[in-house]
Image (cartoon, rainbow, N blue to C red):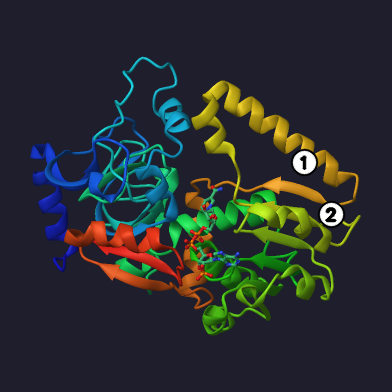
Amino acid sequence: KTFSHKSQKRQFNTSSSHMTIMPAWVIDRYGSNSVLRYTKNAAFPIINYPNEVIIQVHAAGLNPIDVSMRGGYGAASMAMKRDPLNVKQSGSEFPLILGRDVSGVIMECGLDVAPVYFKEGDEVWAAIPPWKQGSLAEFVVLSANEVSKKPKCLSHTEAAAIPYVAATAWSALVNTGGLTMDNCAKKRILILGGSGGVRTFSIQMLKAWGAHVTVTCSQNAERLVRGLGADHVVDYTAGPVEGPLRALEKFDLVLDNVGGATESWALGLLKPWCGAKYVTLVTPFLQNTDRLGVADGMLQTGVTVAAKALKHLTKGVHYRWGMFAPNGLALDDISEMVDAGKICAVVEAEFSFSQVPQAMLKVEKGHARGKTVVTVP
Ligand code: NDP
C-alpha cells in the first residue's frame, strides 16, 4: 500500500480484469457471532452501472447496525431494496458482507465517473447503505455519489471511524432538523446519549457551527464529551435526567440516540411555537417491516409517525424520525471540516482483519466511547 500512484494503477489494471474472488468475512444465515465466516472465495464486486466505482478497502468501520443485521434486523426492507420485483429466492442476500464504513483507494471507475469525479488511485471514504455488500472485504462496489475524497489529514483507520455516523448525523440534524452552518449559532441543542459514534461526531459538528451543546452520558464519558466540545453534561447514571434537564433553558433541537421512554418527556424540553424539533434516531421502522412485511410495516410506520407528529404539533413542537442516508456531498463538506481541524476521528478500538469476530463482539457489548475499526490488509 505504499507503492506510488503509477505502480498502483498498473497493478489495478492488470489485476482487476483477472480477479473473480477476494477475501471477506461473510454470513450465510442470520444469528449470533458464530455465523461470521472468513473466506478467501467471496465474489469479487462488479461494476454494473457507469456511475459505480470499486474501492480497495484499507479500513472498515463497524456500527451497531452491523450487529443487528447479523441477527436479521431489517432483512425484509433490505430484500426489497436489493430486489424490488421480488424475483429472487428468499436468502439470496447470502453470503452477506457486513461493515458500513469504508476508507480506501479507488481501484476501478465506471465510464461516467472517471476522470471527472474520481480516478483510479484516489483515496476515498464512504458510508455503505445497509442494502449493499459491506466493507469487511478486500473490495467493495459503490455508486460514486455515495463516495467522497477522504480527508488528507486522517489515516485510513481514522477515516473509517466517521462516514456512517456522520451521514446519519447529517441526515438527522441537517436534512430532518433543518440545521446548517449558517443558522446554528447560539442554538441550544440537546443530545440524548453523548458518548457513542453518532453523538461524538454530532457534538463536534454542532460546536464547529457555533451551537450550544448539552449532552447526557455516563459519568465516565464526561471527559470524552467535554473534550469534544460539549458545553453542558448531564450524567444519566446518577438518576433520571428529566429533572436536571427541565431545570435548564429550553432547547431548539433534541437529538435522541437513546429512544424508549425518552419520548414521553424529551419533547417538553423544547421551546414551544418557534419551530423547535425533536429528532429521534431510534425508530421502529425496520422492526415493523420485519414483523409485518414491507407493505404493512410501512403502513404501520406511516400511521405511527403521522399520529405522533400531529399530537406534538398541537403543543407547538415538531416530532421527526432521523434515518441514515448515504450522502457523498455531505462527506465532502465533512472532509473539509476534518482537514480544517474542526472534527477529529474518535477511534476507540482497532482490530486486524483476522479479528473481525472480536471486533463485532466489542460493538455488541455496547458502552462505546467512539468507534471500532477493522484494518484490512
Ligand atoms: P453506539 O453504540 O456507538 O453508542 C451507544 C452509546 O450510548 C454508548 O456510548 C452508551 O454508553 C450510551 N448510552 C446508552 N444508554 C444511554 C442513555 N440512557 N443515556 C445516554 N447514553 C446512553 O451507537 P451509535 O452512536 O452508532 O448509534 C446511536 C443510536 O442511533 C443507536 O440506537 C442506533 O441504533 C441509532 N442509529 C440509528 C440510525 C438510523 O438510521 N435511524 C443510524 C445509526 C444509528 P454507556 O452505556 O456506557 O452509557
The x, y position of residue 200, in whole percent, is 53, 70
Residue 377 appears in the rendering: no
Residues at discs 2 and 1 in contact (Cβ within 8 Å): no
Viewer-nearest of discs 2 and 1: 1
Asked whether, in this view, residue 342 is left or right of residue 116, the answer is right
Quarter holding the N terminus is: bottom left
Residue that numbered label 1 is attached to: 308
Question: Is disc 2 placed on a helix, strand or loop?
Answer: loop
Residue that numbered label 2 is attached to: 275
Question: Is disc 1 placed on a helix, strand or loop?
Answer: helix
Other-residue count near label 2 (Cα within 10 Å), few / some / many at <14 / 14–19 / ≥20: some
Other-residue count near label 1 (Cα within 10 Å), few / some / many at <14 / 14–19 / ≥20: few
Q: Nearer the viewer, residue 132 or 146?
A: 132
Q: Amino acid at mark 1?
A: Lys
Q: Amino acid at mark 2?
A: Gly
Asked whether, in this view, residue 104 is left or right of residue 81, the answer is left
